[in-house]
Image (tube, coloured by chain):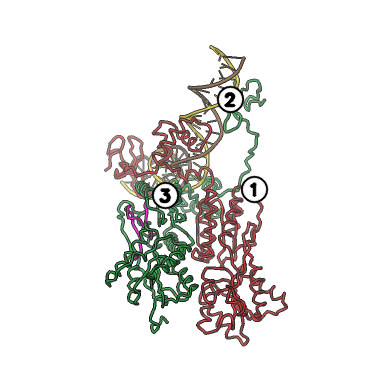
Chain colours: A red, B green, C brown, D yellow
Amino acid sequence: MTPCIKCGNVESIVRSGFIRGKQRMFCKACNLYFTVTPHNHPAPKKPHQTTIIDIAKVLGISPSTVSRALNNSTEINENTRKEILRVANELDYRPNFLAQSLNRGETHTIGVIIPDIQRPFFAGVLAGIQKVATEAGYRVMICQSNESHHTETLNVQALVTSRVDGLLISHSKETTSFEHVKLQLKKGLPIVHFDRVCNEVETAKVIQEDFFGGFALTEHMLLQGYKRIAVFAGPTDLLISKARIDGYKAAHEKYGIAIDEALVYHGSFSRDESVKALNYWLGLPQKPDGIFTIHYANGIEMIMALKEKNISIPEEIGIVAFGDELIASLIEPSLTVFHQFPFKIGETAANILIENIINPDSFIPYTTVIQGELIIRKSSLKTNNQTTI
Amino acid sequence: MTPCIKCGNVESIVRSGFIRGKQRMFCKACNLYFTVTPHNHPAPKKPHQTTIIDIAKVLGISPSTVSRALNNSTEINENTRKEILRVANELDYRPNFLAQSLNRGETHTIGVIIPDIQRPFFAGVLAGIQKVATEAGYRVMICQSNESHHTETLNVQALVTSRVDGLLISHSKETTSFEHVKLQLKKGLPIVHFDRVCNEVETAKVIQEDFFGGFALTEHMLLQGYKRIAVFAGPTDLLISKARIDGYKAAHEKYGIAIDEALVYHGSFSRDESVKALNYWLGLPQKPDGIFTIHYANGIEMIMALKEKNISIPEEIGIVAFGDELIASLIEPSLTVFHQFPFKIGETAANILIENIINPDSFIPYTTVIQGELIIRKSSLKTNNQTTI
DNA sequence: AAAACTATCGCAATCGTTTCCGAAAACGAA
DNA sequence: TTCGTTTTCGGAAACGATTGCGATAGTTTT
């Protein structure tokens, strides 16, 4: 049997249950409990990020003094500070962010939840967020919801677990219940919505001119003489989709043109849907002579599909879309769009969030609208005498 | 003057220096130091993420018991565990990641440093990284170097400060010294390079078929009958740029064709450079009849510029590029490319890094090559009888 | 029914920093 | 000098979670 680790006696030992799988012993002589560890840890001294304590030991001072030196405290002698900084530099000291955050109760990190990094719009927003955040001394933690409500909820939990100081979120198109956001808001977490916002909760929001964009694109088409404009709408519940369609409707009203509800097609943003919508429209007794897509990617896909079908653009069918990308100007015919400014949206949202974080009490949520820009290109220019240079 | 907070006496009070800007007092009677705080904090009880202690208080048990319940420890009564889980759920408890990480000495977070989020290639890599990381229970923290060495160094420091468990890095094109990486590697931080790797340090690497891609693209052009192929190369020091050009040279050697060094243009990847290079080539006494660009974006820009100049592609000048994007297939003429698989690169790199993190001792760095694919399109197809469907 | 054993839980240390409080040493003016 | 004042530093308690160890009540074995 195992001898006692203290007296070395063997007879006085009795087993005393299990702890974490390991046999536990009790020495009746020493009145001592112990577990039999195969005497493993001769302290291999892992390579180790230098801590404040390492510095303190080198100089024979207390950790608190080192901390003061590193934090530009006034309560420290200049010479001591210099010595500490020298050693800190020598040992390549980096403050442990975890310990700092735990102590201060703030992480200087903001969480971002977007549907998909690979979409240029969101990549642009991210870049804007990163810029502002970095300048303000904040880190950024990014999560993708992949357009799934469930994943989005998990993302929120993960970021809360990471104790981010605030949250920037653009909802998945699946998201119609917002309990996960409300809950955190109630706990005092600053949240700012952008693009795909949610009106059920009182947060600051950064949105685009969805209504006006839809209006401008539609008005442009109507003025070009298009009379039956089909709409490729997003999911029924998606707020920005609704707003853009409202703009579409308003333009029609302004010019006293009736709307054929049969021309509105709801679907996801996938490639298949573009083709399905097109086939649906072309199968109608009264075909459309124009198309307005909520998302530019669908517009691009439709141009490709129409070219395959040898339907001329913009003569037989004109097409306009929301959102811009380099590709829209390069495709032939180039695509008329309502251009967004994703970078600016990101910048603005990040600024507002940080404002909210810094001053959580006096902060009053407000909504910011980032102006877009109508860019007219060939896909909707019926008159050939008009050139776009 | 202020009375003593203990005895209430006023006469026995003397001032005793300043602490953090506040006047400090000393009561000679009580032998007590104190600072005059305007009696502000009646504990406003900020809204608060629930902690393990909150749960413990509710149930009148100790925090350690709660911890055990939450961590599937065996040393706990099933009924107790159920009760704890119930309360935890009721209070929407989320473990404080900071505290956990600090205690365990690992953050379950991996840091990623890339030159630019907005480049589709890197966005794709990120998506791949995110997928693998999420599945393995890791968080991802992303930094952009903006192609600046200095920023890259700061990024490394920031991530080290955040105590990431490992680092994925694709170097800025400015980076030629790698001390910042070496230092962390020496401290035991697992690092994996991808795409823009560095051969000076012993890390695992995930690279593309840069040499073979350059070779394949060039060989294709030579077989098409192009004889004077210009190269738009990246910065002179960029490793992947060198490899691609080596492939270009190898293809020439294979077919016994001499290379005119005047056709190799080094420059950054910006739009201006594309145009400058083009003008340079077109100003040569012996103009090129083909172009090979290291980066697809430059290829796209050159196609645009050539079209403006009314130079026909692929007849007068053929063009091929490295890297693929949707746009390459949509532009007219569509662009022949050596397609990369960014998502797969990201997945692979993340997997290797996590492997390294989990088993730091037995891990031996190795290099993985992600195969690319030559996609032939119109921009380099001289013979019109060959169609690409 | 005593002895041997087990299940379950609390205490306290730990992770690295910050900061409140106390105290000694140095400084200044009378 | 002497006492009020200031500067400078150390000790210790946070922050929230994990875990080794000790302890007790209950259970099983002789």
Which residue is under mark 1?
Answer: A361
The quarter in which the C terminus of chain B is drawn is bottom left
Q: Nearer the viewer, mark 2 or mark 3?
A: 2
Badge 3: chain ID: B
Say which quarter of the image contains residue B211: bottom left
> Tag 3: Cα neighbours inside 10 Å, few (<14), some, or many (≥20)?
some
Instruction: Report, in whole angstroms, how far the alpha carbon at label 1 lies from the one at label 3.
Output: 34 Å
Q: Given contact means CB atoms under 8 Å apart, are the residues at marks 2 and 3 in contact?
A: no
Return the residue nearer the eye: A170 or A257: A257
Picture coordinates of residue B69, whole percent (x, y): 47, 51
Q: What residue type is labelled 1?
A: Asp
Judge left or right: residue B1 versus residue A130: right
Residue extent of the magenta highlight = B190-209
Query: Is any atom of residue B55 visible in this view?
Result: no
Judge left or right: residue B127 versus residue B215: right
Which residue is under mark 3?
Answer: B106
Which residue is under mark 2?
Answer: B16
- Judge whether residue B200 is colored magenta: yes
Badge 1: chain ID: A
The answer as to whether the residues below labels 2 and 3 share one chain is: yes
Instruction: Report, in whole angstroms, how far the alpha carbon at label 2 lies from the one at label 1.
Output: 35 Å
